[in-house]
Amino acid sequence: AQSVTQPDIHITVSEGASLELRCNYSYGATPYLFWYVQSPGQGLQLLLKYFSGDTLVQGIKGFEAEFKRSQSSFNLRKPSVHWSDAAEYFCAVVPRFGNEKLTFGTGTRLTIIP
Amino acid sequence: EPEVTQTPSHQVTQMGQEVILRCVPISNHLYFYWYRQILGQKVEFLVSFYNNEISEKSEIFDDQFSVERPDGSNFTLKIRSTKLEDSAMYFCASSEGGRQGGKNIQYFGAGTRLSVL
């Protein structure tokens, strides 16, 4: 069955530390991949996307993500987190064929400690 | 920067009442969507809309739900007779094009929190 998995429900990191949020997908063909961020009380903001080409993609706010076909993963990274990065992060996919709806993972809540 | 606008930000209603959630998509976008997020759960697709008709809907989107693009700018979600379990954050999204054009990047509004009492 097609699915998107974010194995970490909650991650806590210190301000200035590096961050990696995991996302795995299970689809017949590699889907289009997205990361969205939801700050408290806010909507969903697109951080970055992968359609094809270079497997390391850059996004806004200093985030990047790496697509690894062999691992069916699209992990989000940031070298040094800021207190303002505290939020909920969602990995999402659109299949290459068929419907065009976004399917979201369950989200990872990021807490930043001073 | 263009954005998707949703009103109201919070709607409180009594069970059994009708509610209409409103959205103004980004002006040159052609594809429109509604998603919902029940508190503590993941974001779920409800419906997509293109060329003045529903292109896809989920099993959640039953006969109590309807969508409309009443004019050139608004996109609405109506719930005819609300239930307690309809309480959720409802997000509107729009995209410039479909997947074939590589333009199906969906941009979201800030959401409407619906509370059914």
Image (tube, rainbow, N blue to C red):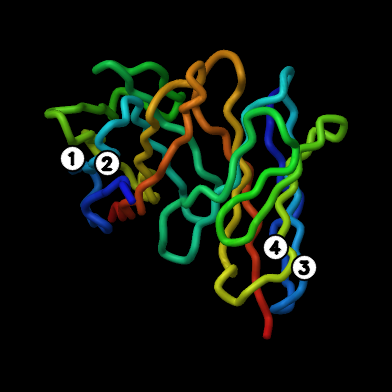
In three-dimensional space, the C-alpha distance between marks 3 and 1, rounded to whole angstroms, equals 47 Å
Q: Above or below — where is B41 with respect to A26?
A: below
Q: Quadrant of residue A79?
A: bottom right
Q: Which residue is mark 3?
A: A18
Residue B117: horizontal and vertical position, in percent? 28, 55
Q: Are marks 1 and 4 on the same chain?
A: no
Q: Are marks 2 and 1 in contact (CB under 8 Å)?
A: yes
Q: Residue at x 32, y 48 (%)?
A: B3
Chain hosting mark 1: B
Which of the two residues, B44 or B86, is positioned nearer the viewer here?
A: B44
Residue B18: horizontal and vertical position, in percent? 18, 40
Q: Are marks 3 and 1 in contact (CB under 8 Å)?
A: no
Label 2 Cα crowd, 10 Å radius (few <14 / some 14-19 / many 20+)? many
In three-dimensional space, the C-alpha distance between marks 2 and 1, rounded to whole angstroms, equals 6 Å
Chain hosting mark 2: B
Q: Residue at x 71, y 47 (%)?
A: A65
Specify which label sits upstream in the sequence, 3 or 4. Answer: 4
In three-dimensional space, the C-alpha distance between marks 3 and 2, rounded to whole angstroms, equals 45 Å
Label 3 Cα crowd, 10 Å radius (few <14 / some 14-19 / many 20+)? few
Q: Which residue is mark 4?
A: A10
Residue A43, which numbered label? Answer: none
Q: Which residue is mark 2?
A: B82
Chain hosting mark 3: A
Q: Above or below — where is A81 with respect to A30?
A: below
Badge 1 marks a residue whose secondary structure is: loop
Q: Amino acid at mark 4?
A: His
Residue B18, which numbered label? Answer: 1
Badge 2 marks a residue whose secondary structure is: loop
Residue lying furthest front: A54
Q: Amino acid at mark 2?
A: Thr
Q: Is residue B78 visible?
A: no
Residue B33: horizontal and vertical position, in percent? 37, 32
